[in-house]
Every structure is written in C-alpha cells, then in structure tokens.
Image: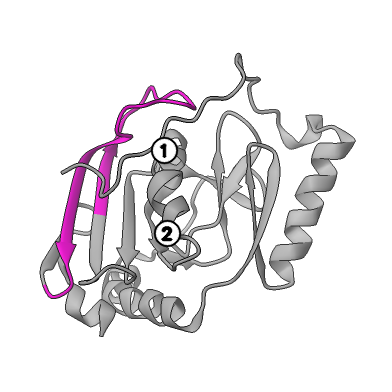
Amino acid sequence: MPLEEPRPRVTHPSPLPSPKPPEEWSDAEAEIQRLCRELNDAGFAAEISWGRVIVSLRMNRRSASIADSLADLLYPLKRANGWRFHQNMAVHIPPLLDHRIPDLTVTSRSPERYDDMRLHGSSTLLVVEVCSPGTRMVDWHEKPLDYARAGVPLYLIVDPVTDPPTMTLMSDPVADLAVDDERQPYREVVMVEAGQPLALPEPFGVKLDTSAVFG
C-alpha cells in the first residue's frame, strides 16, 4: 500500500561527506551536539536535520497517552526478552551527523550506539512516531526516508489526527537509498484503522489490538 500522501522530492547538494566519528568533529559540530544534549536534558526534543537543529516540545498529553498504551501492549514481550523502551534516545541518520528522536523506540538490552546520545538504526527493533497536527507532515514525509536510510527495520506511524485514526507499519527498508531518493523507502507498508488488528512481524510475532492503543 502506498503512503497516505505522496512524498515530495527534496534535493540537496552532492556529493555528501561521510559521517565523522565524534573525536573528529569540528568545534562547531561539537557545539551543536552539546546544545542538543542540553535541550534534550531540559525536556525538549532537539533533532538535527541537514545540520539544522529543530527544537520542539515533548509529546502532548494525548500523544503521550497513546505511546503509553502501545508500550503496555508490548510490555510482556519486553519483559520476556529483556528489551528496552526508549523515549529520549536519538537515532543517527547517515551520512551526516543528523538524528531523529522517536516517540518510542524498542531495542535489545544492549543496542549498538553511534555515540552516547544516538543509536544505530539497524540496532533498533521498532521505532514509533505518534502524529500530532504539528508533526504529521514530518512523520509521514521525511522520517520514513530518514529511518530507512538509518536501517530501522520497523517504522510504525500512529496517526490519531485522521478520522478514523490509523496505524501504519513500514518494514523491509530499501538498502541503497540516496538522501533525495524518490522511491518508497520501505518495501512493505500496511495501514489499518483503529479497531482492526495490526500484525507485527518477528521478533514480535503478535497482533496488536489497535482499539486499545487509541482507547
């Protein structure tokens, strides 16, 4: 199933540099990382997209409640497998120093880190974004490409803004995506409306009760 809305083409200068390890950051790059850490510690969400620091408030009450309800459904698997839930851990988006902070990230007990603030996307099990009116365009049109390029295996968009609300699972990321790629970044896209079950593939192997998420 295609994305709900077409993703516009975005072009950027090329070629792009490879990401540098933290010890090779310039003073300006190190300062940007420090700023993001301080903002995140202060309760804001400070993401980096194409070198720009984008600051927003943490989830609103409705979005936080939805994320909490989803976490409740996944908790038995978390406990059985020793997984971790993260709500303030960024995902590194190559090839620059960009990162995104999902509303909920599920990982193994010891995921592979890019640095002390960011995870490698390929080491996550599931990344979740809960849409709000202010974040919906980014969640649908920018983050699928970002997360696929990062190697995130499962990207779940929980969208209470639509009527009826929907949950959309994107899986099987394309491996060779360019930063301005026009292809759909995930090969498999499944959308269900609230009240319909949503199957999560392994390592989850469960069907989510979506009515419980939005209830």
Q: Quadrant of residue 84?
A: bottom left
Task: Pinpoint residue 83: horizontal percent, then vertical percent.
Answer: 39, 64
Q: Quadrant of residue 153?
A: top left
Task: Pinpoint residue 56: horizontal percent, then vertical percent.
Answer: 63, 64
Q: Nearer the viewer, residue 27 or 183?
A: 183
Secondary element under disc 1, as helix, strand or loop, is helix
Question: In the drawing, what numbered circle is on residue 136?
Answer: 2
Q: Amino acid at mark 1?
A: Leu
Q: State the residue at coordinates (29%, 33%).
A: 184
Q: Quadrant of residue 211?
A: bottom left
Disc 1 marks which residue?
145
- The quadrant the C terminus occupies is bottom left
**Which residue appears farthest toward the right when viewing the image?**
27
Residue mark closest to the camera, 1 vs 2: 2
> Real-space Cα distance between discs 1 and 2?
15 Å
Q: State the residue at coordinates (85%, 46%).
A: 31
As drawn, 78 above or below 184: below
**Magenta run includes residue 180:** yes
Magenta stretch in the rendered image: 169-195
As drawn, 95 above or below 73: above
